[in-house]
Image: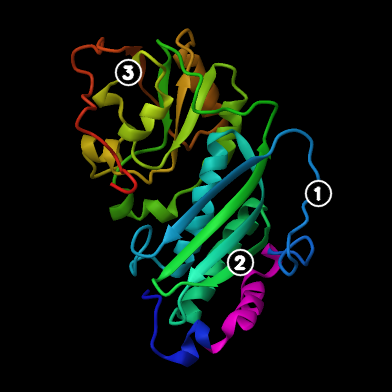
Amino acid sequence: MHPFTQRRSASVAALGETGLIAAISRWLGPASPRAPFGMGDDCAVLPPCPGRLLLTVDPVIYGEHFDDKVPPRGVGEKLFKRNLSDIAAMGGRPRAAVVALALGPHVRLDWLEGFFRGLAAVSRRHRVPVVGGDVARHDGGIVATLTLVGVPAGPRVVTRTGARLGDWIFVTGRLGGSLASGHHYRFAPRLAEGAWLAGRPEVRAMLDVSDGLAKDLHALTPAGAEPALDAAALPCRPGCDLRAALCDGEDYELVLAVAGKTDGAAFLKAWRRVFPRTRLSCIGRFVRRGGCPAGAINLEDCHGFEHLR
């Protein structure tokens, strides 16, 4: 659905900022509580929580993260779920979100309603209220940014660092072809899976695959090591080749390092008892730099998505 119109009566210009904020409140419905615990005041008020907070922010930009092929509801869902995936990668539980919109006067009201209906659907599904945000003019198109606050689901926060030489590399789900398949906005964030993995002492490091496995693995790789991946073990989405699985990006799956002494069969058995419908694959391990065995995937020519390049 094309998000712009030249008909003033069908655009956000017909409402202005005050009318648009009132409409957004209606579209979100119970997904946004009353002020000061939701929209309507200068700041939202959140109840205190013990321990650490998790904080993440991600945008969706017209022409970059979505186009006319993505329904407006799908755009709203993607924005919310991109941030949920970051919380999942830390083994966290989301608590509240704020949304900032920058858009021009020619944005269609029915498009924007669909967008917020998508946000509201994800909010209800995961019980994460949208507690505020901002609206600003931007004549270049549409930029929507969501900031998400979370807390650890258990006593431990898992970060990207912590992997060691000899650790196994696991990944959830399947990889590749996210754009062609629509997975880039239809995916399910791995919140329950991330919380379970964070509770396992053998899991040393974890992140979500957003820019492509080949690129994102660099952030997980310990100093002096390199990933030795088994091509036959890589879980490719149907119709995708090896390069697509490594480089396409926007998979929003979890990739993790598991201690090298772990009994892999027992670890997978424990996983399947809790998540029988979610695939978990051991795709290789971290070896000493320059020591990749024959037949391991050559990652030198696979770069994934590079912002600003």
Q: Could you tell me residue 70's position as x and y percent?
A: 38, 65
Q: Which residues are magenta?
A: 14-31
Judged from the image, the secondary structure of the residue bearing numbered disc 3 is strand
Task: Name the secondary structure under disc 1.
Answer: loop
What residue type is disc 3 on? Glu
**Label 3 CA crowd tier, 10 Å (few <14, some 14–19, many 20+):** many
Residues tagged 1 and 2 counted as in contact (Cβ below 8 A): no
Query: In the image, what residue type sits under mark 2?
Result: Asp
In primary-sequence order, the first of circles 2 and 3 is: 2
> Relative to residue 4, is residue 162 depicted above or below?
above
Q: Position of residue 152 (x, y in %)?
A: 67, 34
* Separation (CA) of disc 1 from disc 2: 21 Å
CA–CA distance in space, label 2 to label 3: 43 Å
Task: Report the residue at 51% width, 28% height from top.
Answer: 272
Sequence-first tag of 1 and 2: 1
> Based on the displayed image, in which of its 4 quarters is residue 247 positioned?
top left
Question: Can residue 245 be seen by looking at this rendering?
Answer: yes
Which quarter of the figure is the N terminus placed in?
A: bottom left
How far from the left and from the top, in percent, is residue 78?
47, 56
**Residue identifier under label 3:** 226
Res. 48 image quadrant: top right
Q: Which is more foreground, mark 1 or mark 2?
A: 2
- Within 10 Å of disc 2 (Cα), the crowding (few <14, some 14-19, many 20+) is some
Q: Secondary structure at mark 2?
A: strand
Question: Is 239 placed above or below 268 here?
Answer: below
What residue is pinned by disc 1? 47
Label of residue 134 in the image: 2
In this image, 297 relative to 235: left or right?
Answer: left
Q: Amino acid at mark 1?
A: Pro
Q: Residues within 10 Å of mark 1 (few under 14, many from 20)?
A: few
